[in-house]
Amino acid sequence: MTTDDPAARLAGVLDQIARAKKLAGRSDAVELIAVSKTHPAEAIEPLIAAGQRVFGENRVQEAQAKWPALREAHPDIRLALIGQLQSNKASEAVALFDQIHSLDRPSLVTVLAKAMDAAGKRPACFIQVNIGDEPQKGGCAVADLPALLTEARAADLPLAGLMALPPADVEPAPYFALLAKLARDHGLAGLSMGMSGDFATAVTLGATHVRVGSALFGARA
Ligand SMILES: *Cc1c(COP(=O)(O)O)cnc(C)c1O
């Protein structure tokens, strides 16, 4: 994006989402998650002023330091956790976030269910799938998805859908299509896929949540 005005960047991303929806003949909602990881409150405030209300963070501790004050001023803000969640941070994550996009293992199902019961708060959960079966990537293996889904449903977690990051530097569309098929096969409506470089493609393939950082905030340090 060529502009450094945050409001113009936001308008540009929303416009690209709208065009991709139109191209795909979609009239359902696509939620833009503005990924604010590493960016300080001063960088976030202009986007809030421009109307953005859903933000994504990848670390519980960083989010705890940044968001309570911003939220006090704007109680309608919603937060999504998009990074790996350690079991010992589950309670803090449930308290802080409205969506958790990184449910990736059975042990986390158990601690999240407990934390939600204790907090009386139930953030929407996306199961993160290692869609390219890459050894270095997080997410549950495609082959392990049915078992993890069974566990999450048995624990009565509020399952929203599937999340994935396709392999870097290759055409992402086949991976988005595969994630969409897995969600369909398992009766899940939510699809968290698409980042700054590929969110429009993801929207044409059914993304319901796109996680966009650098296209809104500029490059991270
Ligand atoms: C950082 C991050 C994003 C945003 O990436 P950009 O390329 O800056 O849009 C999206 N999803 C996850 C899981 C991330 O960690």
Image: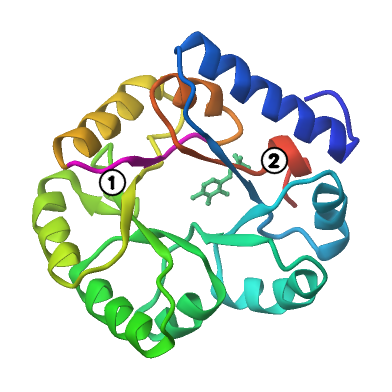
Query: Could you tell me which residue is drawn at 49 percent across and 34 percent down?
Result: 194
Quarter of the image for residue 8 reads top right
Q: Position of residue 127 (x, y in %)?
A: 30, 54
Task: Specify the amino acid type for callout 1.
Answer: Asn
The answer to whether 157 is drawn above or below residue 13 in the figure is below
Report crowding for label 1: few under 14, some 14 to 19, many 20 or more residues within 10 A (C-alpha). Answer: many
Q: Are marks 2 and 1 in contact (CB under 8 Å)?
A: no
* Residue 193 as seen in the image, left or right of residue 77: left
Q: Secondary structure at mark 1?
A: strand
The reply to whether the residue tagged 1 has its Cβ within 8 angstroms of ligand 1 is no
Which residue position holds label 1?
130
Which secondary structure lies at badge 2? helix
Residue 188, how many percent across, how many down? 25, 43
The structure residue drawn at horizontal position 65% and vertical position 78%, both measured from the top left corner, is 64
Image quadrant assignment for residue 77: bottom right
**154 left or right of 98?**
left
**Of pointers 2 and 1, the one earlier in the residue sequence:** 1
Location of residue 164 in the rendering, given as x and y in whole percent from the top left corner: 37, 43
Residue 214 — which label?
2
Amino acid carrying label 2: it is Ser
Span of residues in magenta = 187-194
